[in-house]
Image (cartoon, rainbow, N blue to C red):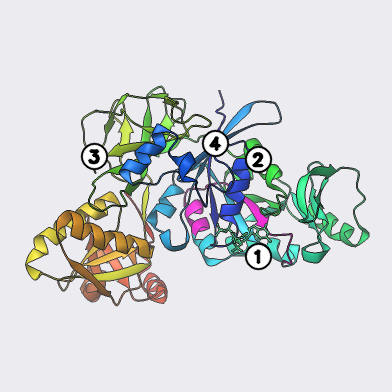
Amino acid sequence: MTSNRRTFAIISHPDAGKTTLTEKLLLTGGAIHLAGEVKARGQARRARSDWMKIEQQRGISVTSSVMTFERANEDGEVITFNLLDTPGHEDFSEDTYRTLTAVDSAIMVIDAAKGIEPQTRKLFEVCRLRSVPIITFVNKVDREGRPVFELLDEIADMLALDVSPQAYPVGMGGEFEGVLDFDTGCIARPEGPSKEFKGRRDCDAEIPERFAENIELAQIGYPEFDLEAYRNGDLTPVYFGSALKNFGVTELIEAIAKYAPPPRPQPAGEEQISPERDEVTGFIFKVQANMDPNHRDRIAFMRQVSGTFKRGMKLTPSGLGKPVAIHSPILFFAQDREVADTAEPGDIIGIPNHGTLRVGDTLSEKNAIRFTGLPNFAPEILRRVALVDPTKTKQLRKALDDLSEEGVIQVFYPEIGGQWIVGVVGQLQLDVLISRLSAEYKVEARLEASPFATARWIRGEDKALNEFEKFNLSNLAKDRDGDLVFMAKSPWDVNYQQEKNPDLTFSATKER
Ligand code: G4P
């Protein structure tokens, strides 16, 4: 049986149009959300369901963490899409990366005027770690953008990925005449004063002479679409469109329905846990704390891997070792999510708890497997933690161990010197750290500049490791698990050490 679930995320740089595209996907897909809600949610609507009341009481906003919509595919089968939000902008954090470990595929949104930008690239690298297949959507073709071939070649070169265009913007900006879909040969044309797409496809249109050659080149000059290469993460089909004006969005949804993989087996050590397994299993990829630091409520997000989950079911979290009944799960199911009471592989379940569930935990009925492969990511911001009251060292250590265990921050204990270092990928994580230290552990702390820019986990034979340690003690630290970490002053530093020490590996990720 193949599943009708498509669990995916959007990766993009701020401003490329992720929010706009999300709204259009939800709208086109007949979702539970109304367009506009992603950005500005109406209070009235919010209070309507019990589920949203939970949200209000707990002060935890999960509304946009998982968005579910449905749509029939070409054969009339209903496909359920689970779109997981990858927080960007100021709330960019390790959660953003970890969310990508819970999806089966991703859409990469690129601004046609800007091409590949830094955050897109970072997120892409995380997808590549797990060979997550990617569909590319080049957005904003209603505006003046860069030449199509330049964009295609940039994606191919910068990301070392085969690109296979599936559409072509017939002109951009002032010359924009619509988007040609290669599959159907139809052009979606702008209509009305705002030049939006209103659903009229011109299927016997003559392609304007001046575009004909380029369109032919786009079709024959690039690799043909190959499902296997796409699913292995080696090739990306490229669509062009405008989220704002609604061009290319339907084609994009159809592409996800048709090509994006249904729930994939997940690694648990040597084993691959198939979605067909009867037992309910899943893993926690994100824990969201209450906005109010005086509350210990958390929502843990579990990606379901196998089985059919039912409300009230007992599952054993690997971190706890004893079963707990999941009485009030948040099931992000289409249409009536407050009354839905089962979930399937590929779905996300929000589990309210008081800090017992941690990022990386496995939940299962039999407590016999452990999912692996949920990594820690090399921090991009490193700060020294300074205590306001120096007698609180023990409390600070406990707090840092706890919070890093939970996945809020990473902690590094330098081999020399007593000042502990915390590492994150987004500024917000540091704000959360300081407020939780104070509210939950009664520890007042300050963050100070550290001389380090990033960190790498070092692995190798004992002999090579010992040798390296001897000469680099002042740049070494241990993480929460006691694993050795090289603290680098710059990316250049990492490259230099890697070249000098070919027997060691300097890894930017570590599996939890
Ligand atoms: P993000 O979530 O990726 O950060 O991007 P978002 O959707 O918020 O879009 C960023 C800006 O780009 C918005 O304009 C949005 O209207 C615009 N935009 C998105 N898609 C398209 C498109 O296809 N064509 C054009 N021309 N513009 C697009 P803004 O002025 O910054 O915000 P707003 O005031 O319109 O919300």
Left or right of residue 300: residue 73: right
Residue at numbered disc 4:
32
The local secondary structure at tag 2 comes to: helix
Residue 416 at what x, y percent from top left?
17, 73
In the rendered structure, which disc, 1 or 2, sits on the residue that comes first in sequence? Answer: 2
The local secondary structure at tag 4 comes to: loop
Segment tinted magenta in the rendering: 123-145
| Quarter containing the N terminus | top right
**Front in this rendered view, residue 270 or 205:** 205
- Distance, label 4 to label 1, CA atoms, is 37 Å
In the rendered structure, which disc, 4 or 1, sits on the residue that comes first in sequence? Answer: 4
**Front in this rendered view, residue 397 or 294:** 294
- Residue at position x 19%, y 60% from top? 438
Residue type highlighted by circle 4: Ile
Residue type highlighted by circle 3: Gly
- Distance, label 1 to label 2, CA atoms, is 30 Å
Please check the rendered image and state whether residue 63 is part of the magenta-colored stretch, yes or no: no
**Front in this rendered view, residue 302 or 122:** 302
Residue 328 at what x, y percent from top left?
33, 30
Residue at numbered disc 2:
28
Residue type highlighted by circle 2: Thr
Residue 150 at what x, y percent from top left?
72, 66
Which numbered circle lies on residue 319? 3
